[in-house]
Image (tube, helix red, strand yellow):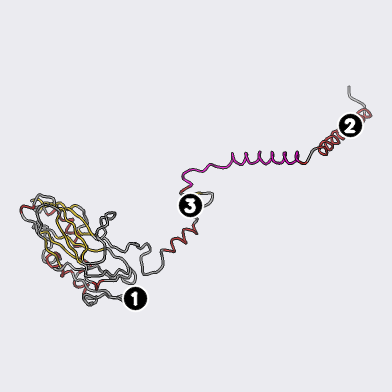
Amino acid sequence: MSSSPQEQNREQKEEQKEEQKEDVKEEEVKKDMKPEDNQNQNEERKAEKWEENKKEEPKESWKDCIYNPRTGEFMGRTASSWGETVSMFTLDDNVPRYQDRVANPGLVIRPHAAEISFNRSDPTNYNQYIQNLHNLLQRYNDSIQERNDLCMVGEYTEQDNEPIKKVCQFKRSMLRQCSGLRDSSFGFAEGKPCIIIKMNRVIGLKPQGDPYINCTAKGDSPLRMQYYPSEARLDKMFFPYYGNKAHADYVQPLVAVQLLLSREDLNVEQTVECKLEGTNLRNDDDRDKFMGRVVFRVKVSE
């Protein structure tokens, strides 16, 4: 049975009075609270919020050490930081961007192999070696080198103030028996292979003294060798080198050593060490086996 309108109005008024009493009580409780109680409640709310954020935050992994997607850092540096670092190595357009800071150059050989092994009776065994030598010497062809300058022997070719640097001649024919002109097999067909040695380029290097290449066989029996040019010198006129832009046509001086193997030397592995001598450049650093020297092995069979 429904209530009359008068009864409904009376009930609503009673409910409003109850709500007002509760509001008054809540206000009285707030007045009675001490300041430190309010502070504690605020701290509790902050702690709860921090815990929620911590759960949502992705955990860091080892991958972030390489690239961090949140900060945009690569290897711990931003893109702008890496740009500043790279610019430190780009000081001059005429020098390589990542120039080796080591002042003492290394030696390298051609054919490009630490172990040279072949049967002299089978050209397919050594074709790769002689092709490697022909490729190296293309830039040294006499027809190309005749366009370059005849420089003063035994003197540095210093041209710091010249925008375009002249290039000193080094003709392929200077290597004579190891030029590939008289013998296109570079001695491999005869079992007396030619090895060509060159020094790595270092910008601004001016070796003191009279640098030359000296090769020795490591073994009980001596090994006969012949150098081309005969003095095995790396003449000062080829120094200094000014970089791949200003000195675009520059060619390094070469020394060829022909191993004059006898019949007793065949089928025996020969270990040869070639060193840069007669200069202030180092060739005895145990931490760097290629600084000023190079070691290779040759075995010729028949």
Q: Is residue 203 above or below residue 129?
A: below
Tags 3 and 2 touching, CB below 8 Å: no
Q: Neighbour class for label 3 at 10 Å: few (<14), some, many (≥20)?
A: some
Mark 1 or 2, which is nearer the eye? Answer: 1
Can residue 60 be found in the magenta stretch?
A: yes
Q: Position of residue 23 (x, y in %)?
A: 84, 36
Find out whether the residues at labels 1 and 2 contact each other: C-beta distance under 8 Å: no
Determine the image quadrant of residue 236: bottom left
Cβ–Cβ below 8 Å for labels 1 and 3?
Answer: no
Residue 218 percent location from the top left of the image: 15, 54
Element on which disc 1 rests: loop
The part of the image, by quadrant, that contains residue 11 is top right
What secondary structure do most residues of the magenta stretch adopt?
helix
164 and 138: which is toward the camera:
164
What amino acid does circle 3 point to?
A: Gly
Identify residue type, mark 2. Gln
Question: What quarter of the picture does the N terminus occupy?
Answer: top right
Looking at the rendered structure, which numbered label has been put on residue 160?
Answer: 1
The numbered dot on residue 76 is 3
Callout 1, which amino acid? Answer: Asp
Say which element carries label 2: helix
Residue 64 as seen in the image, left or right of residue 201: right
Q: Is residue 235 magenta?
A: no
* Residue 146, x across and y down, in percent: 21, 75
User: Residue at image x 89%, y 31%?
Assistant: 12
**Residue position for label 2:** 12
Which residues are drawn in magenta? Answer: 36-64
